Image (cartoon, rainbow, N blue to C red):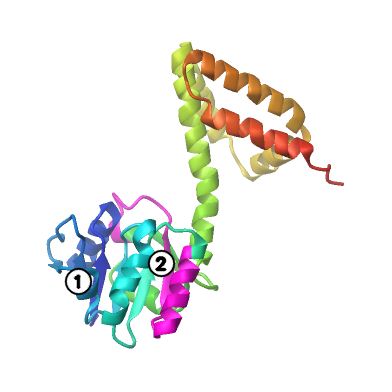
Protein backbone atom coordinates (compact mmCIF):
# COMPACT_ATOMS: atom_id res chain seq x y z
CA UNK A 1 0.00 0.00 0.00
CA UNK A 2 1.30 3.44 -0.93
CA UNK A 3 1.64 6.55 1.19
CA UNK A 4 3.55 7.53 4.31
CA UNK A 5 2.36 6.81 7.84
CA UNK A 6 3.65 9.00 10.65
CA UNK A 7 3.72 7.72 14.22
CA UNK A 8 4.05 10.28 17.00
CA UNK A 9 5.28 8.76 20.24
CA UNK A 10 7.58 5.76 20.67
CA UNK A 11 6.44 4.61 24.08
CA UNK A 12 5.40 1.03 24.74
CA UNK A 13 2.47 1.09 22.31
CA UNK A 14 3.78 3.51 19.69
CA UNK A 15 7.11 1.77 19.22
CA UNK A 16 5.50 -1.63 18.70
CA UNK A 17 2.88 -0.31 16.29
CA UNK A 18 5.48 1.64 14.30
CA UNK A 19 7.77 -1.40 14.17
CA UNK A 20 4.98 -3.71 12.99
CA UNK A 21 3.82 -1.27 10.32
CA UNK A 22 7.35 -0.97 8.96
CA UNK A 23 7.86 -4.74 9.11
CA UNK A 24 4.64 -5.19 7.11
CA UNK A 25 5.95 -2.95 4.35
CA UNK A 26 4.62 0.49 5.29
CA UNK A 27 6.75 3.60 4.85
CA UNK A 28 6.86 4.91 8.42
CA UNK A 29 8.38 8.05 9.89
CA UNK A 30 7.94 9.35 13.40
CA UNK A 31 8.99 11.47 16.32
CA UNK A 32 9.47 11.14 20.04
CA UNK A 33 11.51 13.71 21.99
CA UNK A 34 12.95 11.07 24.32
CA UNK A 35 12.94 7.73 22.47
CA UNK A 36 14.68 6.88 19.16
CA UNK A 37 12.65 5.42 16.31
CA UNK A 38 12.39 1.61 16.06
CA UNK A 39 14.27 -0.26 13.36
CA UNK A 40 12.77 0.43 9.96
CA UNK A 41 11.20 3.74 10.98
CA UNK A 42 12.64 7.07 9.83
CA UNK A 43 13.37 9.33 12.80
CA UNK A 44 12.51 13.02 12.55
CA UNK A 45 13.06 16.08 14.71
CA UNK A 46 9.50 17.17 15.55
CA UNK A 47 5.81 16.31 15.32
CA UNK A 48 5.52 18.69 12.37
CA UNK A 49 8.46 17.15 10.52
CA UNK A 50 7.08 13.67 11.03
CA UNK A 51 3.65 14.71 9.76
CA UNK A 52 5.04 16.48 6.67
CA UNK A 53 4.16 14.41 3.61
CA UNK A 54 2.28 11.76 5.60
CA UNK A 55 -1.23 10.82 4.49
CA UNK A 56 -1.99 9.17 7.85
CA UNK A 57 -0.70 10.36 11.22
CA UNK A 58 -1.07 8.11 14.28
CA UNK A 59 -0.80 10.00 17.57
CA UNK A 60 0.32 7.53 20.25
CA UNK A 61 2.01 9.84 22.73
CA UNK A 62 -0.25 10.47 25.77
CA UNK A 63 -3.66 11.87 26.59
CA UNK A 64 -2.02 14.97 28.08
CA UNK A 65 -0.08 15.62 24.87
CA UNK A 66 -2.85 14.72 22.40
CA UNK A 67 -4.06 18.26 21.71
CA UNK A 68 -0.59 19.82 21.74
CA UNK A 69 0.74 17.22 19.30
CA UNK A 70 -2.10 17.89 16.86
CA UNK A 71 -1.64 21.65 17.16
CA UNK A 72 2.09 21.27 16.47
CA UNK A 73 1.54 19.13 13.37
CA UNK A 74 -1.57 20.71 11.82
CA UNK A 75 0.11 23.30 9.61
CA UNK A 76 2.47 20.68 8.22
CA UNK A 77 -0.31 18.31 7.13
CA UNK A 78 -1.43 18.40 3.52
CA UNK A 79 -5.05 18.33 2.29
CA UNK A 80 -6.36 14.78 2.29
CA UNK A 81 -4.21 13.68 5.21
CA UNK A 82 -5.92 12.01 8.19
CA UNK A 83 -5.16 12.32 11.90
CA UNK A 84 -5.85 9.26 14.08
CA UNK A 85 -5.64 9.65 17.84
CA UNK A 86 -4.81 6.39 19.65
CA UNK A 87 -4.31 7.91 23.09
CA UNK A 88 -6.47 6.89 26.03
CA UNK A 89 -8.08 10.29 26.40
CA UNK A 90 -11.52 11.38 27.55
CA UNK A 91 -14.26 11.62 24.90
CA UNK A 92 -14.22 15.41 25.32
CA UNK A 93 -10.57 15.52 24.24
CA UNK A 94 -11.35 13.43 21.15
CA UNK A 95 -14.20 15.81 20.30
CA UNK A 96 -11.86 18.78 20.73
CA UNK A 97 -9.42 17.17 18.31
CA UNK A 98 -12.22 16.57 15.82
CA UNK A 99 -13.25 20.23 16.00
CA UNK A 100 -9.64 21.34 15.49
CA UNK A 101 -9.45 19.07 12.47
CA UNK A 102 -12.68 20.38 10.94
CA UNK A 103 -11.38 23.94 11.26
CA UNK A 104 -8.30 22.99 9.23
CA UNK A 105 -9.89 20.48 6.85
CA UNK A 106 -8.20 17.47 8.48
CA UNK A 107 -10.50 14.53 9.40
CA UNK A 108 -9.87 13.05 12.84
CA UNK A 109 -10.40 9.39 13.69
CA UNK A 110 -10.69 8.25 17.31
CA UNK A 111 -9.02 4.87 17.91
CA UNK A 112 -9.24 2.95 21.17
CA UNK A 113 -6.85 0.06 21.77
CA UNK A 114 -8.86 -2.51 23.69
CA UNK A 115 -6.07 -4.68 25.12
CA UNK A 116 -2.41 -4.32 26.13
CA UNK A 117 -0.21 -3.79 23.06
CA UNK A 118 2.82 -5.88 24.21
CA UNK A 119 2.48 -9.37 22.82
CA UNK A 120 0.03 -8.21 20.14
CA UNK A 121 1.56 -5.12 18.57
CA UNK A 122 -0.42 -3.93 15.56
CA UNK A 123 -2.82 -6.87 15.99
CA UNK A 124 -4.18 -5.45 19.26
CA UNK A 125 -7.99 -5.17 18.96
CA UNK A 126 -8.99 -1.57 18.16
CA UNK A 127 -12.23 0.36 17.91
CA UNK A 128 -12.44 3.31 15.51
CA UNK A 129 -15.01 6.09 15.25
CA UNK A 130 -15.26 9.56 13.78
CA UNK A 131 -14.44 11.04 10.41
CA UNK A 132 -12.49 8.77 8.05
CA UNK A 133 -12.72 5.82 10.45
CA UNK A 134 -13.55 3.49 7.54
CA UNK A 135 -10.57 4.75 5.53
CA UNK A 136 -8.17 4.39 8.47
CA UNK A 137 -9.47 0.90 9.26
CA UNK A 138 -8.97 -0.29 5.68
CA UNK A 139 -5.48 1.20 5.60
CA UNK A 140 -4.37 -0.39 8.86
CA UNK A 141 -6.02 -3.72 8.13
CA UNK A 142 -3.88 -3.87 5.01
CA UNK A 143 -0.89 -4.22 7.33
CA UNK A 144 -2.53 -6.81 9.59
CA UNK A 145 -4.32 -4.60 12.13
CA UNK A 146 -7.54 -5.68 13.89
CA UNK A 147 -9.87 -2.65 13.64
CA UNK A 148 -13.64 -2.55 14.24
CA UNK A 149 -15.39 0.56 12.93
CA UNK A 150 -18.17 2.10 15.03
CA UNK A 151 -20.94 4.20 13.52
CA UNK A 152 -20.48 7.43 15.43
CA UNK A 153 -18.33 10.50 16.02
CA UNK A 154 -14.87 10.85 17.50
CA UNK A 155 -15.23 10.14 21.20
CA UNK A 156 -17.43 7.07 20.76
CA UNK A 157 -14.50 4.65 20.67
CA UNK A 158 -12.98 6.36 23.71
CA UNK A 159 -16.31 6.17 25.55
CA UNK A 160 -16.58 2.43 25.06
CA UNK A 161 -13.00 1.84 26.18
CA UNK A 162 -13.28 4.01 29.30
CA UNK A 163 -16.64 2.52 30.31
CA UNK A 164 -14.95 -0.86 30.30
CA UNK A 165 -12.00 0.64 32.19
CA UNK A 166 -14.26 1.79 35.02
CA UNK A 167 -15.30 -1.84 35.48
CA UNK A 168 -12.10 -3.68 34.71
CA UNK A 169 -9.54 -1.37 36.27
CA UNK A 170 -11.81 -0.84 39.27
CA UNK A 171 -12.15 -4.59 39.74
CA UNK A 172 -8.40 -5.04 39.35
CA UNK A 173 -7.69 -2.34 41.92
CA UNK A 174 -10.14 -3.90 44.38
CA UNK A 175 -8.52 -7.32 43.94
CA UNK A 176 -5.05 -5.87 44.52
CA UNK A 177 -6.22 -4.04 47.66
CA UNK A 178 -8.06 -7.10 48.99
CA UNK A 179 -5.05 -9.38 48.46
CA UNK A 180 -2.74 -6.85 50.09
CA UNK A 181 -5.00 -6.83 53.14
CA UNK A 182 -5.31 -10.62 53.07
CA UNK A 183 -1.52 -10.91 53.01
CA UNK A 184 -1.29 -8.70 56.07
CA UNK A 185 -3.94 -10.87 57.78
CA UNK A 186 -2.26 -14.15 56.80
CA UNK A 187 -5.13 -15.21 54.51
CA UNK A 188 -3.80 -14.44 51.04
CA UNK A 189 -3.92 -18.01 49.67
CA UNK A 190 -7.50 -18.48 50.89
CA UNK A 191 -8.71 -15.21 49.36
CA UNK A 192 -6.84 -15.73 46.09
CA UNK A 193 -8.57 -19.11 45.63
CA UNK A 194 -11.94 -17.58 46.51
CA UNK A 195 -11.51 -14.76 43.97
CA UNK A 196 -10.50 -17.22 41.23
CA UNK A 197 -13.59 -19.36 41.91
CA UNK A 198 -15.90 -16.35 41.76
CA UNK A 199 -14.40 -15.15 38.47
CA UNK A 200 -14.67 -18.63 36.94
CA UNK A 201 -18.39 -18.81 37.79
CA UNK A 202 -19.22 -15.40 36.35
CA UNK A 203 -21.83 -15.01 33.61
CA UNK A 204 -24.38 -12.50 32.33
CA UNK A 205 -26.63 -13.54 35.24
CA UNK A 206 -23.83 -12.56 37.63
CA UNK A 207 -23.98 -8.96 36.38
CA UNK A 208 -27.75 -8.77 36.97
CA UNK A 209 -27.39 -10.30 40.43
CA UNK A 210 -24.64 -7.86 41.40
CA UNK A 211 -26.54 -4.78 40.21
CA UNK A 212 -29.82 -5.82 41.84
CA UNK A 213 -28.22 -6.93 45.09
CA UNK A 214 -26.06 -3.84 45.41
CA UNK A 215 -29.06 -1.52 45.19
CA UNK A 216 -31.31 -3.69 47.31
CA UNK A 217 -28.82 -4.08 50.15
CA UNK A 218 -27.03 -0.72 49.86
CA UNK A 219 -27.58 0.29 53.51
CA UNK A 220 -26.25 -2.94 55.00
CA UNK A 221 -23.38 -3.20 52.53
CA UNK A 222 -22.37 0.41 53.14
CA UNK A 223 -21.99 -0.38 56.83
CA UNK A 224 -20.13 -3.57 55.93
CA UNK A 225 -17.64 -1.67 53.79
CA UNK A 226 -17.15 0.89 56.55
CA UNK A 227 -16.12 -1.99 58.80
CA UNK A 228 -13.91 -3.39 56.04
CA UNK A 229 -12.19 -0.02 55.58
CA UNK A 230 -11.56 0.15 59.33
CA UNK A 231 -10.07 -3.37 59.27
CA UNK A 232 -7.75 -2.47 56.40
CA UNK A 233 -6.54 0.58 58.29
CA UNK A 234 -5.83 -1.63 61.31
CA UNK A 235 -3.84 -3.96 59.03
CA UNK A 236 -1.81 -1.02 57.72
CA UNK A 237 -3.38 -1.06 54.25
CA UNK A 238 -4.85 2.23 52.95
CA UNK A 239 -8.55 1.44 52.28
CA UNK A 240 -8.82 3.34 48.99
CA UNK A 241 -11.16 0.95 47.18
CA UNK A 242 -12.99 -0.17 50.32
CA UNK A 243 -13.75 3.41 51.27
CA UNK A 244 -14.86 4.21 47.72
CA UNK A 245 -17.21 1.21 47.89
CA UNK A 246 -18.63 2.48 51.17
CA UNK A 247 -19.24 5.88 49.60
CA UNK A 248 -20.99 4.41 46.56
CA UNK A 249 -23.25 2.22 48.70
CA UNK A 250 -24.18 5.21 50.83
CA UNK A 251 -25.05 7.20 47.71
CA UNK A 252 -27.27 4.38 46.44
CA UNK A 253 -28.94 4.03 49.84
CA UNK A 254 -29.88 7.72 49.74
CA UNK A 255 -31.57 7.43 46.34
CA UNK A 256 -35.32 6.78 46.04
CA UNK A 257 -36.15 3.13 45.55
CA UNK A 258 -36.95 2.18 41.96
CA UNK A 259 -40.48 0.82 41.39
Q: Residue at 53%, 19% (x, y): give it.
A: 232
Does the magenta-highlighted stretch encompass residue 117?
A: yes
What residue occupies the far bottom of the structure in this picture? 79
Circle 2 SS class: strand
Occupied quadrant, residue 227 = top right
Q: Nearer the viewer, mark 2 or mark 1?
A: 1
Query: Horizontally, is 55 left or right of 136 in the view?
Result: left
Q: Residue at 48%, 35% (x, y): give it.
A: 173
Say which residue label 2 marks.
Answer: 147
Query: Horizontally, is 16 left or right of 136 in the view?
Result: left
Say which residue label 1 marks.
Answer: 28
The magenta segment is 93-122
Does the magenta-highlighted stretch encompass residue 16?
A: no
Q: Residue at 52%, 18% (x, y): give it.
A: 233
Where's the N terminus, which quadrant?
Answer: bottom left
Is residue 213 positioned above or below 135 on the image?
Answer: above
Query: Would residue 206 be seen by someone viewing this image from the given angle?
Result: yes
Query: Horizontally, is 154 left or right of 87 in the view?
Result: right
- Residue 209 % position (x, y): 70, 38
What residue occupies the far right of the structure in this picture? 259
Circle 1 SS class: strand
- Residue 5 % position (x, y): 25, 74
- Residue 156 % position (x, y): 53, 66
Q: Alpha carbon of mark 2 to alpha carbon of mark 1: how far?
A: 19 Å
Circle 2 Cα neighbour tier, 10 Å, few/some/many (<14 / 14–19 / ≥20): many
Q: Residue at 55%, 44% (x, y): give it.
A: 167
Amino acid sequence: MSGVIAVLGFGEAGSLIAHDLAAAGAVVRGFDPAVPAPVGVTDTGSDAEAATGADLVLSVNSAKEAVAAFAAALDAMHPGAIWADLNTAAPGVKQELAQMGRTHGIPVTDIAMMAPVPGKGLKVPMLASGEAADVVAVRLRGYGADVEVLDGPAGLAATKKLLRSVFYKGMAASIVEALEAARAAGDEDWLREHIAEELARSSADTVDRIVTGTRQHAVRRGAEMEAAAQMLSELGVPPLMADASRSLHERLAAQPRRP
